[in-house]
Amino acid sequence: MPAPRRPRLLYVTDLAYPARGRRYCDEDIDLTARLRAEFDLALCHPRDAAALMDGFDAVVVRNSGPVLHYQEAYDAFRARAAAGGTRVYNPLHGRGDMAGKQYLLDLTAAGLPVIPTVDRARDLDRLPAVAEYAVKPKAGADSIGLRFLPYDGLAGLAYGDGLLVQPRIDFRYEVSFYFVDDRFQYALYAPDPERRWELEPYEAGEDDLAFARRFVDWNTLDHGIQRVDACRTREGELLLVELEDLNPYLSLDLVAAPVRERFVDAMAESLRGFLAA
């Protein structure tokens, strides 16, 4: 009797993307090598995903780089996946970075612990008074288009072009919490605010995890990988920086081998559940 067919996954990654302080290719080569124990895998560039995804049981979007670099191809991929009922992991209804930066405005309006964010000149007085403000595009990623301005430089900005403004927070460090589905896996932090990607293991306490889970629950993704990025203010408060739910880099090379193995096991289990749903 023939063995049952193994699930076929199209794994989307940009192995050549020059990320600052990170090697996308190493992470995805290692992760796919481990997942091949259970799944049949093919890797492709994000520009090729729409043309290649037929014949696979699901498309797994991983380290595919900022969508701004291939917006037309990404839009075509989403449209074709929706029209054909293609399973995409993470699912395309994510409310975080997958949908742009609107969630920062929504969370600010809801009073959640996020860096205060506005997108209109008339709302600037809602922001705290600081020396500088961060200005970024709503559709931005990987610090593309980010600049810092004093308050008197904000009034003349073209807000209709999709800009966000936030106070530049004087924080102690940044910390990231990594989840598969709704299960916490590990946390890493950057002790030096000037070196975002020089990360070390972080022992997350109960309050830390309650903070991070609040945003994972808000996002309502039943399956998928999420990274909750936060900063610790000088006063000790955690504030959300980003909710990465499209293609969060995992920094798996910086965690201990048992943690890495547990993550791969959790991802494989999540994919099995996703395919069976």
Image: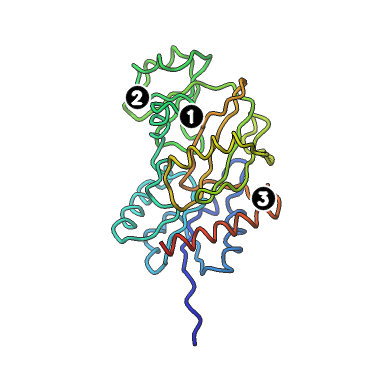
- Residue lying farthest front? 206
Q: Is residue 4 left or right of residue 199?
A: left
The spot of residue 135 in percent (x, y) is 45, 25
Q: Is residue 258 left or right of residue 155?
A: right
Q: Which residue is mark 3?
A: 253
Q: Which residue is mark 1?
A: 146
Going 46% across and 14% down the picture, which residue do you hit?
A: 151
Task: Please determine whether, in this image, residue 191 is positioned above or below residue 133.
Answer: below
Element type at mark 2 = helix
Which residue type does callout 1 highlight?
Answer: Leu
CA distance for labels 2 and 3: 40 Å
Which of 18/256 is in front?
Answer: 256
Which of 75/238 is in front?
Answer: 238
CA distance for labels 2 and 1: 14 Å
Task: Please determine whether, in this image, residue 94 is positioned above or below residue 107.
Answer: below
What is the count of numbered marks? 3
The spot of residue 72 in percent (x, y) is 35, 48
Going 35% across and 30% down the picture, which residue do you hit?
A: 162
Q: Which residue is mark 2?
A: 159
Could you tell me if the residues under marks 1 and 3 are in contact, i.e. CB atoms within 8 Å? Answer: no
Element type at mark 1 = loop
Which residue type does callout 2 highlight?
Answer: Tyr
Which residue type does callout 3 highlight?
Answer: Asp
Question: Would you call the spot at circle 2 few (<14 residues within 10 Å), some (14-19), or many (20 or more)?
Answer: some
Going 52% across and 14% down the picture, which residue do you hit?
A: 130
Q: Report the colour scheme.
A: rainbow
The spot of residue 137 in percent (x, y) is 41, 31
CA distance for labels 1 and 3: 28 Å
Q: Earlier in the sequence, mark 1 or mark 3?
A: 1
Question: Would you call the spot at circle 3 few (<14 residues within 10 Å), some (14-19), or many (20 or more)?
Answer: few
